[in-house]
Image (cartoon, helix red, strand yellow):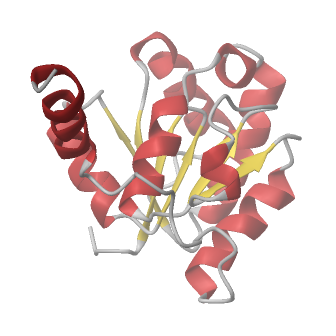
Amino acid sequence: LEKNRYILVTLHRPHNVDNIDNLKIILDAFANLSQKYKIVFPVHPRKSKLIHQLLKDEYNSPKNIILLEPLGYLEFLNLNINCAVVVTDSGGLQEETTVLKKPCITIRPNTERAITCTHGTNYLLTILDKKEIIRRVDMVFSGEHNPFIVDGIKYWDGKTGGRIAEIIDKEILKN
């Protein structure tokens, strides 16, 4: 896989994978995108058979969609670091992509991590729309102005542990 030249996908929320109509909209967008880009998709075990079958039956198993078994954290982190964009419905991944300054398109009606949208790299796709998924991914690859990347989030700098230790030392241990 070429660095910054593929889409990393994760899906597991019932709204997206248990509703067959919603899943088909998403897979249709991926089949379309796979004509231009590689897609790496570690598939959740409970939907693996269905997703494999739908991609085979509906789209003739697009060669640029690489379906994987679930990965360990470090393997997945490596894919996250090296992808161009993440398409997900995961809450934690919204935070990880913000820390890594990776564009993230979250396919959900809402998020509990709103700061990743206002100050991070996350775009919340609240209405499931094939054309909008494609448009947002194309924006990342085209090099157009990228509305996903902003200055970052205050205190999300990897120094939290040091700040906590300093407060404990100053406020608790010295008293």
Residue 5, image x, y percentages: 40, 74
User: In the image, is 100 to the left or to the right of 105?
Assistant: left
Q: How many marks?
A: 0
What residue do we see at 40% from left, 15% from top?
A: 45
Residue 89, image x, y percentages: 61, 33
Say whether residue 155 is visible: yes
Say whether residue 65 is visible: no
User: In the image, is 136 to the left or to the right of 64?
Assistant: right
Instruction: For the N terminus, give its image quadrant.
Output: bottom left
For this rendering, which residue is in front, 92 or 83?
Answer: 92
Q: Which quadrant holds residue 138?
A: bottom right
Residue 47, image x, y percentages: 52, 16
User: In the image, is 145 to the left or to the right of 154?
Assistant: right
For this rendering, which residue is in front, 160 or 120?
Answer: 160
For this rendering, which residue is in front, 141 or 102?
Answer: 102
Examine the rendered structure and indicate whether residue 130 appears above or below residue 36. above
What residue do we see at 62% from left, 59% from top?
A: 119
For this rendering, which residue is in front, 144 or 166?
Answer: 166
What residue do we see at 70% from left, 32% from top?
A: 111
What residue do we see at 83% from left, 59% from top?
A: 132
Q: Which quadrant holds residue 35?
A: bottom right
